[in-house]
Image: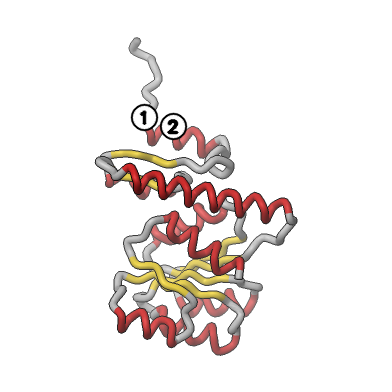
Amino acid sequence: MENSLNINALNLLRLLSENGITSKIPIFIIDDKSSLKIEYLKLGAFDCIEKPFNVDELVLKIKNMINIADNCSDKKLQGEKKNNILFVDDEKIILSILTSRYKSKGYNVYSTDDGVKALEIINNNKIDLVVTDYYMKTMNGDELTKSIKKSHKEIKIILLTSQDSEDFVKKAFEIGADDYVSKPFSPMELDSRIKKLLSE
């Protein structure tokens, strides 16, 4: 039929996002087009798995997703306050994805592409956790981390970095980072790290 609706994964996800479904139901996308991953995540997909995939990996991701969902439900039942998260990254696409993803998960989200502006946000708001890129133009993540911990030791910090050598990891913890996630990262892995730090 000439006017039949062509529903592919992207169109379906866009439809679900427009109707607020992606904020209520975790959605996995399995696709052989890695180029669409950013679009899927921006529209609220929980995670993306590229074909061909390992079944054991998929099962593990689903189990982790269920654990995260259960913990979120427990928090809602207990009437816990919303946590305030600040994302700092000079890559605007990543910043946009993280901002929309965690807003849809019920967090109060602040974001900036500049370390100096990040410190201003922290001084004017009650921030519980900061997720910052390591390499940035105005102020690198290590300098930002040191500045935050100097006056706000209670704030948890996750560094996003393309490095994961033993020396780098040691340095990250020495300057005050509470955790780090290697780029490119799985959104579900970051979910898990954020949840863990905010529950401590």
Name the residue tied to disc 1: 8
- Report the label total: 2
Q: Residue at coordinates 61% horizontally, 60% vertically from top-left?
A: 108
In x, y percent, where is residue 146? 48, 86
Give the residue type that dot 1 points to. Asn
| View extreme (bottom): residue | 150
Mark 1: give few (<14), some (14-19) or many (20+) Cα within 10 Å.
Answer: few
* In the image: residue 194, left or right of residue 185: right
Name the residue tied to disc 2: 12
Q: Residue at coordinates 36% horizontally, 29% vertically from top-left?
A: 8
Residue 58 lies, with reference to residue 187, above or below; the image says above
According to the image, what is the colour scheme of the structure? secondary structure
Quarter where residue 110 is shown: bottom right
In x, y percent, where is residue 174? 43, 87
Residue 143 lies, with reference to residue 109, above or below; the image says below
Residue 139 appears in the picture as rendered = no
